[in-house]
Amino acid sequence: MPLMEELRIVLLRTCPCLALVGCADTNAPVAGTTLHPGTTDDLDTRSSESTTPAPEPTPTTSDTGPAASSTTDDTSGSSSTTTGEPATLCGNGILDPGETCDLGTPHNWDQGACTSQCQGASCGDGLVFIGVETCDEGSDNDPGYGHCDPVTCQPGPRCGDAHLDPEEECDAGDPDGGGIIDGADVPCQPGCAWEGRLAFISSLTYDGDLGGLAGADLKCRQLAEARKFHDPERFKAWLSTGDESPLGRFSFAADPIVLPTGLLVAPDLAALISGGSGDGIRSSETGATLLEARVWTNTADTGASFSKTDHCAGWTSADKQFKARIGLNAVPKQPPGPWQTWHDERYWTSYGPFYCNTMAHLYCIED
C-alpha cells in the first residue's frame, strides 16, 4: 500500500471526524510529524528519528598535533594549511615561498642548476653543479693549497696539477702527483714527494756557534719546514764533534739520497761515504744552485770525525781562536780538471780548516 495512503488511514482512526467538514483543521500538524516548509500536504514521516540536530564533525588529531587540511589559492598556485604553515611543495614546478627555483620533479637534483631543496646552485653550498663546478667543499672552500676555490669552485693549487707548489717536493701531474719527471734521477711518489732521502746545502750561512749538534739539526729542520718539505723533523746536519759523527747520527740505509731537484747524490748512505756525493750537494732547500760553497763538517771521508779538537768547541763558539774542518760542496764539472780532484779527494766533506768566526753553510740530510 502507498505510504501516503497508510498515513491517511492512521489519521482517520485517530480522528474519525476528519471525514466531516470542519471537524478539525486538516492542516494542523500531528504530534511527532513535521510539515515540509511551504507545504500543507507533504508530511515528513521521520517520526522515529531524533529531532536534535547531529553535531558537526571535528578535526582528528595525531600524535604530533592537529591534522591540517590543505587549501589552494587558485590565483597564485601556492598552498598552505589550516595551521597557517606553508605546505612543502618543492618539485611541483611552481615557485613557492622559501624557494629560489623549482623546475619540477625530476629536474630538481643536487648536481643541477636547481637542487632537490628548490634552491639555486651556488658555489659554497657543498654540492657540485656538474659541468659548471669541479669541486665544492661548502664552508671548507679555501683559496689555499689542496682546497677548492670559494669563488670559482675549481680546484686550487694541489698535488697532481703538474705544477711545483711550495708544499711539494715534486709533481708529475698524475691525479696523485706520482710519476716520472724529465731530468730527475728518481721518480716522484704519490703525494708529491721524491722517492728517497732529501739532502740540501743550507741557503743561510752561520758562524761556528751553531748551538751544538742539536742546534745545527734545528737549523736544518727550520729550513726544511720553511720550504714545506713533507718531514722536516727528520733532517739532521752532516756534522761531527770529537765524539759524535754521521756514522752514529744517521740510521737510514737503503734509500737513495736526492737533491730537492730530483738529482741523485748517492744510492744510499754507504755509497755516499764510499763513493762521495756525485756532482755534489749543490742545491739549497729552495732549489737554488750553489758552487764552491764552504760547509761546516769536521767529518772525514770515512764518515767519522775528522778532528778531536777542531770543531768550534763542539759547535758552540764563534771565537776566531778556534777552527774547524769544512767541506767544499761542488765545483763545475769539467773532468779531468778540478772536478776530478774534488771528487777523488772527497773534498765535498773534508777540504780544509776554517776559522770559527767566519761564515759557512750546513749540509742537511733527511734521516
Image (tube, grey):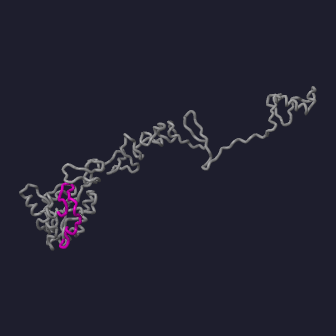
**Looking at the image, can residue 40 be seen?**
no
Residue at 26% in and 62% down: 222
Could you say which is closer to the camera, residue 182 or residue 337?
A: 182
Q: Is residue 93 magenta?
A: no
309 versus 233 height, above or below? below
Q: Which residue ends up furthest to the left in the rendered image?
A: 337
Q: Residue at x 7, y 58 (%)?
A: 338
From the top left corner, tell me how far across and down residue 318 is, in percent: 18, 69
| Residue at the front extreme, as displayed | 1
Q: Quadrant of residue 218?
A: bottom left
Q: Residue at x 38, y 46 (%)?
A: 136
Give the magenta-colored segment's residue range.
241-270
Q: Nearer the viewer, residue 179 or 68?
A: 179
* Horizontal arrangement in the rendering, residue 264 relative to residue 105 (left or right): left
Quick check: 27 above or below 176?
Answer: above
Q: In this picture, is 111 found above or below 317?
A: above
